[in-house]
Each structure stands twice: as C-alpha cells, then as structure tokens.
Image (cartoon, rainbow, N blue to C red):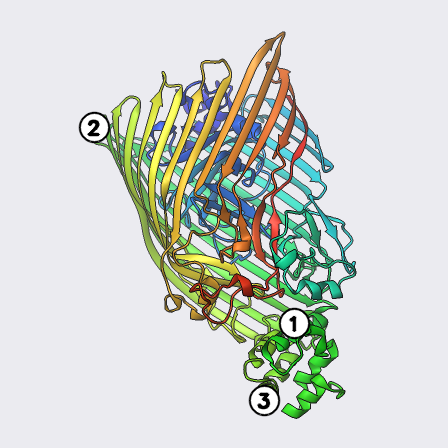
Amino acid sequence: MRLNQFLRCTASAAVVGAVAFGFAGVASAQDQASSVDDIIVTAQKREQSLQDVPIVVTSLSAETLQDAGVRDIKDLQILTPGLTVTSTSSEASTTARIRGVGTVGDNPGLESSVGVVIDGVYRSRNSVGFGDLGEMERIEVLKGPQGTLFGKNTSAGVINIITAAPSFTPGYNAEFTAGNFGALGASGSVTGPINDQVAMRLYAGRRVRDGFNDVDRGDGQRAESDDGNQDFYTLRGQLLILPNDTSSIRIIADYSSRDEYCCAASQLRSGPTAAFVDLLSDGTGVAPPAAGFAALPFSRQTYSNRSTAQEIADMGLSVEANIDLDWFGGSTLTSVTSWRDWSSDLAQDIDYSGADIAYRLNDGENGYGVETLTQEFRLAGATDNLDWLVGVFATDESVNRRDSFYLGTDYNAFISYLLTANLNAATAASPTPPGAIPISPARIGCFTASPTSPAALGGCLYGAVPASGPGLGVGQAYRDVYSQGSRSVAIFTNNTWSVTEQLDLTLGLRYTLDEKELSGLQTNTNGNGTTCGRALANAAVIGGALGAAAAPGILGALCLPFTNVAFNNRIVQQDFDDGELSGTVKAAYRLNPSVLGYVSYARGYKSFGFNLDRVQTGITPTASLFFPSETVDSYEAGVKMTLLNRSLLLNATYFDQTFENFQLNTFNGVGFTVEPVPELTSRGVDADMVWFSPVEGLSFTGGLTYTDAQYGQFTAADLLVPANFANASLLPGSRPSFAPKWSSTLSINFDRSLGNGLQFGFSLAGKYMTQYNTGSDLIPFKLQEGFGTVNGRISIGSEDERWTLEAWAQNLTDEEYIQVGFNGPLQGTAFQSTVQPGGTFYNRARDTQTYNAFLGAPRTFGATLRLKY
C-alpha cells in the first residue's frame, strides 16, 4: 500500500506517527494493551516488540503516564526502578541518575550522564529537557550506556520521550485541574488535516500553584512568604507533511516559560555558626540547633531574606524527514535537524538564612543559556537476515554563563564572628568566649591596615587602637562571564544479523570527535578584593601577632573566592579536543517463542569539559578549569520471558558497569569543584514485569533494581588537584550518593465499564528506595533513610472518553524526604586539615558545618476534568 494512501485511511494518530517517523515511530496499541506483544519500543531506532530488544528498557505508555500523574521527567521516577531525578538551587538544575550514576547539577560546564531525547532531538543537559512534556505517546527509559544510537554523552542511560504526532483524523481535547496549594491548570490540543497532504497538532498548557515551603524572611528584603511555587506555560505546534507516496516530514516548534520562586532550603543540622546568623538576623536566622548540634527533625520551614525569583525560557524547532529509497533493495533515509535555545535568569539567597550575608539578583547578570544546533542523518534498511543502519551526527553548542555575587549588609559582621571563633580556637592566649575578642566589622581593618606591626595589630584587636584598614565592601562583589563553544561530529553504525531463526548478533560502533573552547573574564567590582590584598600583604605580621597556625584561617576568610583579589580581571582561555570510540556487541538467542536470552557489552563515553565557576586551592585560583572525559564499560546478561498465554512479561538482567574518570561535581560550602574519580563500579540486577490479569481491565506493572555501587580506592595523588582529596576522603571504597541498594516500583491499573455508557477506573503507583546519601561528599548528615511514595487516582467518565472526571493525589501518604543535602555556605567546616582517627579528613565530633536540604514535594491532591472529541 502506498504511504500516503495508508496514512489517509488510518484513524490512529499514533500509526501516522509510526509510519511517518520511520524509526522514531510510536504505537497506540500500548494504550489499550492486553498482551505483551502490544508493547512496542524504538530503543534500537526501529520498531520492535519490547521482548525482542536485548537491552533493559522500561516502556511507559501514555495511559500509564497519565494514571501516575507524570508531566515531566521528575515525575517519571515513580514508575522506574533505579531512576532518581532531583533538582537543587533552581528548577534549572535538574539531574537524572540511573543505577546510582548521573551528573550532579548546578554546573553548566557538565553535560548529562543520562541523556534526554525528545522526539529524536538530543538535549545535552537534563534541565534543558525538564518541563511540561504535553501530550505523550510513551516514554522509554533505557538503562546502561547507549553510546551508539542516541547522540553523545549517554554513559548511564537514556530517557527517550515520544510525544503525540499530528493526525489526519480531527480531534480535540481539553483538561482542567484544581488542587491544594492553590493549584490551577488548563491545557488543550487540536489535531486534524489542513489539506490532503498536511496534518497539524497544536498544544497549549498553563499551570500555577503556590509554594510548598513557608519562608521566614528574616531581615526582610524578600517580599514572598512562600517558596517553590509553579507558574509556567507551554506551546507546541506540529505539522505532518506527506509530499508524495514515499516521504514524510514532521516539523515541531515549541516554547515554554517558567516564572517561579525556587529554591529556599531547610536545615538538616544547625551548627555552631547558627548563633552568629541569629545575632545578625531580624529574628531566627536558621533553624535552632538541636542539643549537641545533632540532626534536626524534618521541617518545611525555610529561612531566606532575599528573593529566589527565577525565569526560564525554552524554545526550539526541529524537522524530521523520512524518504523511502530503492537503494540496497529498499532503505529509508532519515534526517533530523534541530535548533534549541534555553536560557535562565536566577536569583538566590546564597546563605539560605534570614541574615543578609550574600545573594544573587535576578538582574540579567546571573544565569546561563544553552543554544544548540544539531543535524543527524541515518540510512537504514533490512534484508532477510540483516537489519542495518549507518549515520552521522553533528552538533554545535554554545554555553554562556553569567555569574554575579553580592555581599549583604551582614557580610562584614558575619566574617568578623567567624574570625573571632577561629582566633579563639587557634590562639592559646585568647579568652575562650567568642565575644571576648572584640572583632567588630570595623576591626577587620586591623588586618588590613598599612603600615602595621605585630604589636600594632595586637593593640588594634585587643586594645582601644582604632582600625584603619579597609573592610569588606557591601553590594556587588564580582561579575563573571563565561562562554564555552562545543562542536561534535560522530559517525555510527548499528547492525543486527539473524544468524538463525533463534540467534541474533548485533554490532554497533560510534566514533565521536569533540572539541571545546572556553573563554571567560572574572572581574571584581566596587573595589572588591582590596581587603584580601591588604591582608595578604600583612601575612607575616598576622602570623607574628597571632601565631602561624592562625594566619591561614584569617587569610582564607578574607580571601574567599568571591572576595579574592587574585580573580580581578582574570582572563580564562582554554581549549581541548578528543576522539573516542564507543559501541556495543550483543548476542540474543530465542530458546523458544516465549524466552529470549542475551548477553551484551557496551562502551559509553561522556565528553570532557570546563568548570564554569571560581575555583581556588587555598587562596590561589586553580590554573586549569579542565576535567577529562568519562568512560564506562558495561556487561549485561539477561532473560526476557513472555508467559501465561503472552499476558505476562517477566524480565531480569545482571549488569556490571565500570566508570573511569567519573565526573564528580561537589559543593564545598563556597564553590563547586569538579574532580574526576578514577573508578566507580555499579553492579546488580534489573527486573521488571507486566501482567495483564484475567480480570477484565486489571493490569500490574512493577520493577526491582538491586545496585551494588562503589567507588574504587584512590589517594590524593590520583586526583587532578590533590588538594581536593580532603573533601573527597569519604569516597574511596564507599557507596556513591543517590545509589540505593534496592529500588522497587509497582503500579496497579483498573478500568471497567459500568454500563449505561460509563467507565470507572482507579490506579495506584508506588516506589520504595532503601537509604542513600544525598551529598556527593557522603557527609553522614546528608543521609536519606529508606522511604516510599504512592500516587493514586479514581476516575469516572464516558466509555468513549468524551469526558472523564478524576480525583488524584501525589505522594498520597505525605512522605517526608529530602532531595539533596548540601553544606550551608560559609556556615562551618566539615572536613579537617589533617587526617582524623577514622583515616579520613572527616571527624563528626569536630564538624561545625550547618547542613541544608532541598526537599521532596509534600502530598498534593485535586481533581481533573478531561474532555475529548
């Protein structure tokens, strides 16, 4: 049957998509699936039954996603064992991890270990793929490195998202939602033919909600009393063009915008510096410390005196063309062209407290943007015993970061209190009570006066001699800009040879050539750095007056990255290029029509990059911001079983992954460091099941992942910057962050006719994970105990789905959990400067750090009305 005749005679939009997209097609049968054979995936860039694909794939249909309340990739994790998705200081910092491996957010220089692909277009960072996904056909989560077919940098896995395509059958739908926290939402779409050769689909959605967290505004510069609200809209328009019988073109244009407040944080533990913050704040500055500075109970109370306003815009255009050719006995040429522009402007209360210590403004000088142009060509065909594919992929990407830092009105006083505490600890002659050494904000000038002497310095600190040197300025401290250009070209092939009816062999290869260049200008403003410069000039005097042991702490406090004179007008210029071979070898053997066994080897690659941040060792700026490429070797052995008259899917896979130069991004309380860890292993078992039960309309889906993840043993000499080892000393031989030993999911879906044209349904989707650490440095205070979440819905509507009314709840049991724990900026010290009794640089008894956390969402509930025609 000719292509356009077939399309015009088909009522299903999903079948239109399947034929028109070629390998990126979709199958609507999943929505009404009644047997395992109905589950179709495109994990190998061609349509296959899930049970014929020799890799671990979690395939989620549109109906399953809707029942579980999935609207973005963060919601997706409740349906996928072994997947965690978190966000940190803004919704622009979203990170996905699979089997305990992923890229920590908050640093645009790092690309993602888990690739996000939406309608065939690769998104280089998870945050760029985070948003309202609109109308979906299905989502496929591919676990393990996918370095052959899915673009670059997929060393841990791929989230492959396929949205609904235009249909030549007219259709309309609308959705209206109301819920707690003032949630309101509306969306709608229309699809149908424009003429005999062109179909369209237009989607629009808007959602608003109040914040989840209460805010104590402290000194009061902030206007908002809640945080973590939602206010975004999305527009997506599509055209499906059938110019002739052998070709199709799909054009997608989209735009989304977020204008929200995010993200204030709660305290996991308030350390000794809490007393200083309280003294400076109008009221309580942070959560009051527990006895003995122990961990605090879970609380949604946050402290923030400055705005956390964020504005994020995402837009793009893609064109996918498929042309059937007579070459090589019949083949299909696919071209995917895309342009995307993602940008953010962010405000931040840097100290996460009620005191006015440090902040960033949403003034156009803080945020980052990613502009990407990609082109992919694939030529694919099949003979009686060979499915073959060759292709080329190229991308040109620009990353621009603007970083602006402000010192608040309390900064001088806060640093003074820190100096007081350090002097008391380091100077035997000084009194013990912190208030006994009169270092007021003005007395910072004791360290910066010129000329001076040990006697003069002592008289200034302990006597009545007035301070004459400069203190730390208030207001903007620096304004940095970074521009990173990246170009990548890859050639690839993926071929499956059916040796016999039972045995298939697959070979995939990809060679990628990456080149990147970084240019940056780090600039101090308003005379910032003068205080640091004067103190450095007086280093010998400070040591003579207070002792050599006290001098480094004083100089460090006055020369933090945001006040360090060495960064003034510092130009950063670096470039690098690298080539890497990745690929896969698979053997799949069908023991009988119901059982497939397979083994595979895959090598993945994640590109090198540059740390787009102020980084220093001690008080010296780090000379190079470069970090090398990350690679992974992965072995798998699995079985896929189709049982009970093809109504039960039961799959299990053993995996063994070894990562080299794992790109670890860590916040140390004053900035981000990227340090390649020499080795990380992740071994375990993935299992999943789907059962279409004998009870009409009742189905079960579940999965289980066991992960034994561990860092290899390493020492300071194995790191790019040996001085970073102290803060990484808990890692050797330990389980990495976000790597629960057990992760399990289960969903129950039921839909049944009630008669008289009515349909009833309910669903429950739950996930449980055992304990894991939420901090990349593995500090014990950042541990999240095992927990589970449940989403549910009850619906009633017409059998023809003209209308459906549902009541729903997310996190039904109101489980309290943290997403990410982190060090409160400037508020204490976690790691010591010498090895402690346990053999690391960490000693809990000497830990003075305040720890904060970004929290998981509370229980939300509401009602949704859907209309469809």
The nearer-to-camera label among 2 and 1 is 1
Q: Which residue is mark 2?
A: 500
Q: Earlier in the sequence, mark 2 or mark 1?
A: 1
Q: Residue furthest top?
A: 756
Please report contact status of discs 2 and 1: CB closer than 8 Å, yes or no: no
- Seen in the picture, residue 18 relative to 843 is either above or below; the reply is above
The residue positioned 60% from the left and 22% from the top of the image is 171
Q: Secondary structure at mark 3?
A: helix
Nearest the eye: 665 or 22: 665
Q: Position of residue 860 (x, y in %)?
A: 66, 35
Few, some or many residues within 10 Å of mark 3 (<14, 14–19, 20+): some
> How many numbered discs?
3
Question: Which label was assigned to residue 544?
Answer: 3
Q: Position of residue 188 (x, y in %)?
A: 65, 29
Q: How far is disc 2 from disc 1 in space, using C-alphas? A: 73 Å
Q: Earlier in the sequence, mark 3 or mark 2?
A: 2
Please report contact status of discs 1 and 3: CB closer than 8 Å, yes or no: no
Q: Earlier in the sequence, mark 1 or mark 3?
A: 1
Q: Amino acid at mark 1?
A: Leu
Q: How far is disc 1 from disc 3 in space, using C-alphas? A: 20 Å
The nearer-to-camera label among 3 and 2 is 3
Q: Which residue is mark 1?
A: 418
**Left-right relation of 640 to 316:** left
Question: Which label was assigned to residue 803?
Answer: none
